Structures are given as structure tokens and as C-alpha cells.
């Protein structure tokens, strides 16, 4: 999932990066920013200004994704449900109504700028269970290839307290790492992380750059400031851990102003959390050092040369398959002399991999009866050795 623009991969010794440094950006929007509870609908002017910012990034060739809360809040508004906590079944039913409204709102707002929106509803299992993770990742990749903007939300109609994120800050971070985004923007009720909760301590000061999330940084987090916001600063710090570990930079900025992304681009008040690497290198470190290989693919000399040139591993170059593995598992890749070339995440189960081994990618549909992935291991999922 390579980005459509060239990045400078900022490594900043305490200096905030620029929004233009990034090519794939996830923007998280909370309920309290989007929904006007008193009026019973969306904050139209604010949304229009945000979408204008998103459209500008899109026109510049950047990939844009939105993680949007608001389904339950919109549903309860449309149903005129009383304030206060909802029973689980009421919350799920309100979300079912609100999701339709939320999707329409984003589709119409983006459509005014000639941008197609695609709705993706996810649950915790979609980012934690490998096969579902890969399916969600592939769907996001294809939407971005089509220059659509994925609008992603937790599927509150089926999620329960035991199998949910509970806040879209952490969901945004999971989506950002899944999509190999290089920046996650958390638009918030507050304009960043302070040395102490500013509502309690008037002398608290904004921290513009967090190079590493330490226990001291975690201790600065307070609770949620809004009745609609499930996540407070504590969940944003948790999101920062997820994002930066996966190679994604993160910024917390105020969403209470119009054109919030423009404000970030112009150097407005915000807190930047810096990642040590980028999404691709972080992912490859994970593949190389954290996953146990479940099988081995032996390839011919031509495939070895192609991999050295930065190509993906195609079925045609595979001469032998060993082991029992499932799609998404890590496998070793060996050359014709038996030496390890590298390792990567395989796109097929072992049985299907054996059936298409040695064949052209164009033959896959005829052999398997369905259009599968062109590559056995995509280059973004492949780590080569030093040889």
C-alpha cells in the first residue's frame, strides 16, 4: 500500500513536522465535533470547512481516510431519545439508524468536491484477527487506488462492551497502522497535550512535540471533557502508542475551529507524537523479528533476481512449497541453493499456493475459480536478507 506522493519521512529532534510531509493521512472526527445535540443534527458549516480541507489534501495527490464517530449520537437525535446512558440494545438500534445518516452526510459533503466516499464498518475482531485484518486492509487499499475516501466507523450495531474499541481514538490508530498511513490526526475538544489537565490546573502548558511516550507523558493525561466523547486524553495517549509503534506519526489538534486541518498546516497549536520509523519499515521489522514462520517457499534464480530489484514474489517463480500455513502467515523464502533470501506474509493458504505454484498470475482465476492476489508475497510484506 504505497503512498501516492513522495515523503520526506521527517525525523525531527523536537521540531513539529509539516502536514505536507505526509502522503497518507487518517483524520479522526469525534461525535462532539460533528453532532449538534441541541439542534438535533450535524454542524453543517464546520463539516463543510473540514471537507474543504480534506479535498485540498486529496487534490494534492494525498490519500485521505476518515474515522468518524457520530452514528449513535445521530440516531438518538433522529429518534429524539432522552439524554443519559442508553441500554445496549437501544444504543445498537440507534446506531443502525444513525449509520445510514452518517454515511449519507459524508457522501454528500465529499461529493460536492467530486470525491467518492466508501463506508467501512469494523469491529475489534477486524483489526485483531489476521484474516479479517487482511481483508479490511485490502478493501482500504483498493478504495485508495480508486481515489475514494474511506469513511470508517466502529460497527456499533453489533459491537458489545466485550468486543469493542469503545472509542474512536484507538480505532483511528488501528486503522492508520492497518492502512500504512504515515499520519493520524486526532481532532479533539482540546488543542493538544498539556503538562496537566488545563481545566484543573490553569498554569498547565501545551507540549508541542512528544518524541517518545514515557510514563511521565502518560501521567499528564486527564479524562474526557465532553459528554459525547468516550475517549479522553488517556485514550489519545493509548492511540499514540499504537500509532507510533506502527510507524505512524500522530497529531492532536483542536476540532472546535473551522478549517482545523488548515490550522495544523499553518502551524497552529497542536501536539505531535513522533514515530521512530515509517509504516513500511516498522511493518518489516515486525515481519522480520516478531513472527514465527509457518512454512517455506523455494524460488528459482529469476525470482531471486526480481526480489533483489524490489519486485513482489509471483507464483511463477516458486518451485517448491513446504509447511501448513494460512493466508497472512509468515513464511521463509529460500533460493534454489536452499539459503534463506528473506521472509514475508503469504497471500494464499498452503493448499491454494501449491495449486498456483509455477503458474502465471493470469492463470490464477482459472485454477482457483476466483480472482485472487496477483503476488504470492507483496513487496510491502517482504523482508529480504542482507545477502
Image: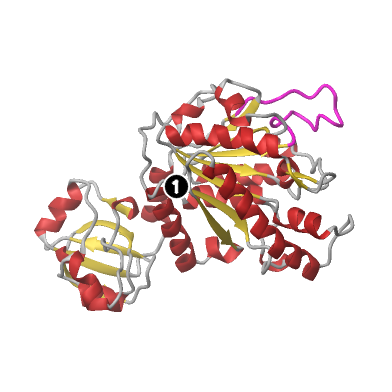
- Magenta stretch holds residue 261: no
Q: Which segment is the magenta one?
A: 189-209
Query: Which residue occupies 60% across, 48% down?
Result: 106
Query: Which residue occupies 78% across, 39% down?
Result: 222
Which picture quadrant has residue 34? top right
Query: Which residue occupies 16% across, 52% down?
Result: 306
Q: Which residue is mark 1?
A: 180
Colouring style? secondary structure
Can residue 86 be spotted in the picture? yes
Residue 286 or residue 132, whichever sits in front: 132
**Left or right: 375, with 119 as reference point:** left
**Left or right: 257, with 349 as reference point:** right
What x and y, as percent, mark residue 60?
A: 42, 31
The relative height of residue 104 versus residue 188 in the rendered view (above or below) is: below
| Disc 1 secondary structure class | loop
What x and y, as percent, mark residue 250?
A: 57, 37
Residue 27 or residue 334, whichever sits in front: 27
Can residue 217 be spotted in the picture? no
Residue 289 or residue 3, whichever sits in front: 3
**Left or right: 217, with 267 as reference point:** right
What x and y, as percent, mark residue 15?
A: 54, 21
- Magenta stretch holds residue 192: yes
The relative height of residue 349 versus residue 343 in the rendered view (above or below) is: below
Query: Which residue occupies 80% across, 33% down?
Result: 197
**Left or right: 78, with 101 as reference point:** right
Q: Main secondary structure of the magenta part?
A: loop
The relative height of residue 223 versus residue 123 in the rendered view (above or below) is: above
Crowdedness near tag 1: few (<14), some (14–19) or many (≥20) residues, C-alpha within 10 Å: many
Amino acid at each position: 500500500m504505497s503512498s501516492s506522493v513522495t515523503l520526506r519521512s521527517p525525523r525531527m529532534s523536537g521540531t513539529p513536522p509539516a502536514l505536507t510531509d505526509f502522503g497518507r493521512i487518517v483524520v479522526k472526527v469525534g461525535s462532539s465535533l460533528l453532532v449538534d445535540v441541541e439542534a438535533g443534527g450535524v454542524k453543517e458549516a464546520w463539516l463543510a470547512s473540514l471537507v474543504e480541507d480534506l479535498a485540498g489534501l486529496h487534490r494534492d495527490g494525498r490519500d485521505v481516510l476518515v474515522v468518524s464517530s457520530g452514528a449513535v449520537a445521530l440516531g438518538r437525535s433522529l429518534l429524539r431519545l432522552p439524554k443519559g446512558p442508553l441500554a445496549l440494545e437501544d444504543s445498537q438500534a440507534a446506531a443502525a439508524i444513525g449509520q445510514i445518516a452518517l454515511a449519507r452526510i459524508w457522501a454528500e459533503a465529499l461529493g460536492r468536491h467530486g470525491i467518492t466516499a466508501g463506508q467501512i464498518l469494523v469491529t475489534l475482531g477486524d483489526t485483531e484477527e489476521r484474516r479479517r485484518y487482511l481483508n479490511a486492509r485490502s478493501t482500504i487499499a483498493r478504495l485508495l487506488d480508486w481515489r475514494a475516501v474511506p469513511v470508517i466507523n466502529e460497527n456499533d450495531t453489533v459491537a458489545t462492551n466485550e468486543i469493542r474499541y469503545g472509542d474512536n481514538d484507538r480505532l483511528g490508530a488501528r486503522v492508520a497502522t492497518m492502512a500504512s498511513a504515515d499520519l493520524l490526526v486526532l481532532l479533539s475538544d482540546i488543542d493538544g497535550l498539556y503538562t496537566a489537565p488545563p481545566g484543573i490546573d490553569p498554569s498547565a502548558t501545551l507540549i508541542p512535540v512528544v518524541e517518545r511516550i514515557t510514563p511521565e507523558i502518560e501521567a499528564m493525561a486527564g479524562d474526557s471533557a465532553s459528554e459525547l466523547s468516550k475517549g479522553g486524553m488517556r485514550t489519545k495517549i493509548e492511540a499514540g502508542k499504537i500509532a507510533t509503534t506502527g510507524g505512524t506519526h500522530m497529531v492532536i489538534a483542536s476540532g472546535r475551529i473551522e478549517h482545523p486541518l488548515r490550522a495544523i498546516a499553518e502551524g497552529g497549536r497542536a501536539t505531535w507524537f513522533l514515530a521512530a520509523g515509517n509504516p513500511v519499515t516498522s511493518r518489516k521489522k515486525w515481519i522480520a523479528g516478531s513472527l514465527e514462520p509457518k512454512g517455506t517457499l523455494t524460488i528459482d534464480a529469476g525470482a531471486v533476481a526480481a526480489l533483489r530489484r524490489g519486485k513482489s514474489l509471483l507464483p511463477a517463480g516458486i518451485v517448491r512449497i513446504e509447511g501448513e500455513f494460512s493466508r497472512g502467515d509468515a513464511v521463509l523464502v529460500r533460493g534454489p541453493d536452499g539459503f534463506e533470501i528473506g521472509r514475508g506474509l503469504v497471500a494464499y493458504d498452503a493448499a491454494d499456493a501449491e495449486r498456483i505454484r509455477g503458474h502465471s498470475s493470469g492463470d490464477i482465476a482459472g485454477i482457483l475459480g476466483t480472482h485472487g492476489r496477483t503476488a504470492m508475497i507483496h513487496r510491502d510484506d517482504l523482508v529480504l536478507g542482507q545477502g
